[in-house]
Amino acid sequence: MPLSEFDLIATHFAPMAAPGALSLLDDAAFLAPPAGHDLVLTKDMLVAGVHFFADDPPGMIAKKALRVNLSDLAAKGAEPLGFLLGLALPKDITDAWLAGFAYGLAEDAAAHAIPLQGGDTVRSSGPLMISVTAIGSVPAGRMVRRLAVQPGDALYVSGTIGNSAIGLQLRSQAEAEWARSLAEASRSWLLERYLLPEPRMVLAPAVQHFAHAAMDISDGFVGDLTKMLTGSGCGAEIGLAGIPLSAQVQEALRFNPALMETALTGGDDYELLVAVPPHHVAAFETAAHGAAITRIGTATDSAQGIQFLGPDRKPHRFSKGSFVHF
Amino acid sequence: MPLSEFDLIATHFAPMAAPGALSLLDDAAFLAPPAGHDLVLTKDMLVAGVHFFADDPPGMIAKKALRVNLSDLAAKGAEPLGFLLGLALPKDITDAWLAGFAYGLAEDAAAHAIPLQGGDTVRSSGPLMISVTAIGSVPAGRMVRRLAVQPGDALYVSGTIGNSAIGLQLRSQAEAEWARSLAEASRSWLLERYLLPEPRMVLAPAVQHFAHAAMDISDGFVGDLTKMLTGSGCGAEIGLAGIPLSAQVQEALRFNPALMETALTGGDDYELLVAVPPHHVAAFETAAHGAAITRIGTATDSAQGIQFLGPDRKPHRFSKGSFVHF
């Protein structure tokens, strides 16, 4: 480790710190919360070898660590206020690696107007670990819950599903026939989707104003939708044919139809699941401002459970309900 | 790992969660900040083998992880609002260990009225790591800074210095003559001081109302006081004979005078250094409400630098300025 903790912070992280973070020279930062608002607090940890590969580009690792937390804020309808960064660094981390990490982090912090408020840096005798705590705000009492779907709610998903999961498969099965059959541009795009999710901040206001419930999909579409509905005491019929898939995933499915299961149950989508009451459907779609959202079904009461219907309208069973990072 | 992440959280952590944490079943928690207040944000990470021993009692590890963050809030004059917990768990962690960890954490969270707001649990292929983000509040604009000492300020330290550092020495030198000469009660007390710091929350209001500057001592008295004064553009003469030491440390020093250096430069004191302007000295001492505080000197301008004076009033040089956890 070429730099002391003090120099490392001064060199790489102080330049992106919020004014209240006092150049990261104090024990703590101060932050004036917006009046009449609640704070929204979330924390996601990432571990090398579990949530990313240790040899991924450091700037991409930094962005992913921040973005998975931003995604939680978006799902709660919250606006970002700031974040704290915990870094446990293995001894072989170089100064160039840290520079790349900090550069990527600063880019994303600026792009999402979420300044660094503080953090801590320690040595790890194990893998690199990143612990981000993100703080956002919503008007008082307005944080959108996960387990508050009501029967009759329209169910939406943002973006497209399975890009990251298929991207991850490409890393472990680069020599498989389906992987080699993919167009080079498709392969690159899918690999990048795994590295770098796109948090749906643009949907946060629509979620805040018009949703009964929302969550971000981190552990797979099927598993997370099931959790959200079951925990809300609701059921649903979801037609698999109506789930939005990117052209690149569709291309992969043509070469290997069995990847459908991976796409729908794999993790790291970081798309939003949103339940919108019928009288707000039009307003929600308008407020999405052109961001891709797809209506995938309607919540029912819990009596019928949750059915995923194949093209033949028969219930489809997934062999693995959801992706587990833990 | 006998429990799934879901069951682990539901069993061990949900019972101590704040109402806004929604039983830890959501992606985020909400928290209504007190009107007219700033948030105070701090994060300290602890790694097994660096900040504690992996075989320390799990409840003590949990309490230390929370207390070192509480200590930062106290140093800023802040009142606790809540905390987030990140846990990276090695595979050999048992359910009994987690139960002990959660029990200790819940005890301290209740004792300090700082509810659990959320967090994340991941697997570690390396050591156990704990990342706590603590959130407190101060009246708007009133967070007490570290680097704001002014010439003429009275310099105070809370409690006694070196207990934890000598406790740590006892663990590595249990068979040394000085260690074996200590009374059993002294040995136990010092060992426990290393395991379990006492955050000086009781001093937070006095610090908030009457201090120019404050910090908590985590990296050693000499090094941290030097950082605080130098960063403030101040100097001081500090008489070593006036630094408060516990009876137990004094006992150890009688058997091994060389431990004085360890006591004053070792880490993990978690006592407060406080700079108080002359016109607030009486009010500060009254507001301490009987908590032990000792005046150790007076800040000067920076021209004379920082001198630690031995009993002969000659400057003492420490071979190692401060303890570095990093």
Image (cartoon, coloured by chain):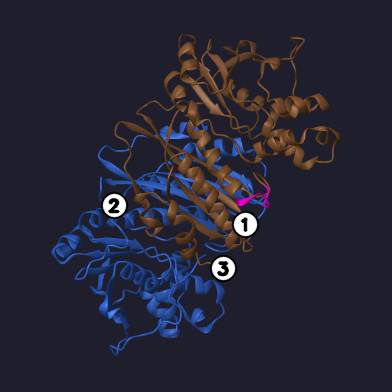
Chain colours: A brown, B blue
Mark 2 crowd level (few <14, some 14–19, many ≥20, 10 Å Cα): many
Which dot marks residue B127? 1
Which chain does the numbered disc 2 sit on?
Answer: B
Q: Secondary structure at mark 3?
A: loop
The magenta stretch spans residue B109: no
Q: Picture quarter containing residue A123?
A: bottom right
Evaluate whether residue A308 shows in this view. Answer: no
Asked if the magenta segment contains residue A57, the reply would be yes
Label 3: which residue? Answer: A2
Name the residue that disc number 2 marks. B143
From this viewpoint, which residue is outermost toward the right?
A177
Magenta range is A53-58
Mark 3 vs 1: CB contact within 8 A? no
Chain at tag 3: A
User: Is A119 above or below relative to B166?
Assistant: above
Give the residue at the far left of this rendering. B279
Q: Could you tell me how far apart the alpha carbons at marks 3 and 1 are, in whole angstroms? A: 23 Å
Amino acid bearing label 3: Pro
Label 3 Cα neighbours within 10 Å, binned few <14 / some 14-19 / many ≥20: few
**Residue B54 occupies which quadrant of the picture?**
bottom right
Residue sitting at x 64%, y 41%: A195
Q: Nearer the viewer, mark 2 or mark 3?
A: 3
B254 in relation to A177, above or below: below
Q: Chain of mark 1?
A: B
- Please tell me whether the stretch drawn in magenta is mainly helix, strand or loop: loop
